[in-house]
Image: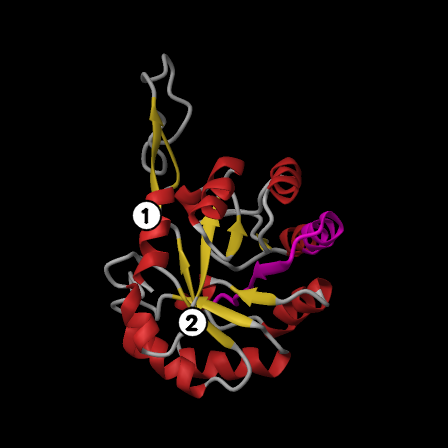
Amino acid sequence: MLVEICVTSVQSALNAQIAGAHRIELCSEWAVGGITPSAGLIQQVLQRVHLPVGGLIRPRGGNFVYTEEEFQVMLSDIEFCKQLGVSGIVSGVLYNDQTIDIPRTRRLLQAAAPLPFTFHRAFDQVPDALQALLALEEIGVTRILTSGQQLTAEKGLDLLVQLKNQSQTTTILPGGGIHAENVFLFQQNGFTEIHASVSGLYSEHLPPKIPLNNPKFLEETQIYGSDIEKIKSIINSL
């Protein structure tokens, strides 16, 4: 089973490689669910890590309904990521009613070509997951990252299995709360890939004199990153 690890720093990427991960999804800002990583971060990870690296294309946190200006940023970021040498693109767009914006998603996929394209966890917002799968397969999406529309992939396992069984050409990539104690469930149910964000506390600092972060979104005194031992535990459990 292929293990993909979501990372937000060079050190996390190196940790994923050391631990034996097979692929990386690179983004920034775990606290908001991930946004497009900076040019410098992409360059440094590609230079120092010898694993396939998928670049997340998401211009901001919040919902997945984008203005034309935001969408143009996404297209530009895809082109830049391709120039830097990423191995795949991770993205997606929704309409206001949370159905998939197929025309725009197709444009993202075309911009990403010939790289593989993963439709990310915006999928977990759609009202009809099985219908959405058919629409994404029709335009040629490589894989879909989803928790089965539950808080964790374990809780969403029934839908994940339905999606896998219905899919003809698109790989279903379970992600969300996967760890060493439950990864066997996905292996037993025939999934070939899993996505995990197994993190640990890197360091803890004194509180700043003047807080800069909104405490609702991010604890300013703590830095988290990929945990080598937790990743190893997942891989050893397979």
Q: Viewed as shown, does residue 150 lie left or right of 101? A: left
In the image, which disc is placed on residue 126? Answer: 2
| Between 225 and 1, the one nearer to me in the picture | 1
| Between 75 and 62, the one nearer to me in the picture | 75
Residue 109 position (above or below residue 27): below
List x then y, in percent, for residue 213: 40, 28
Residue 187 position (above or below residue 206): below
What's under tag 2, amino acid-wise? Val
What's under tag 1, amino acid-wise? Lys
| Between 104 and 49, the one nearer to me in the picture | 49
Q: Viewed as shown, does residue 34 lie left or right of 88? A: left
Residue under the image location 72 percent in, 54 percent down: 82
Q: Viewed as shown, does residue 43 lie left or right of 154? A: right
List x then y, in percent, for residue 225: 40, 39
Residue 30 position (above or below residue 96): above
In magenta segment, residue 91: yes
Q: Nearer the viewer, mark 2 or mark 1?
A: 1
Q: Are marks 2 and 1 in contact (CB under 8 Å)?
A: no
| Local secondary structure at mark 2 | loop
Quick one: which residue is furthest to the top in this view?
209
**Which quadrant of the rendered structure holds the N terminus?**
bottom left
Residue under the image location 37 percent in, 79 percent down: 190
List x then y, in percent, for residue 132: 48, 78
Upstream in the sequence, badge 2 or badge 1? 2
Report the span colored magenta: 75-96
Quick one: which residue is furthest to the right in this view?
83
For the question of whether residue 184 can be seen, the reply is yes
For the question of whether residue 156 can be seen, the reply is no
Q: Which residue is mark 1?
A: 230
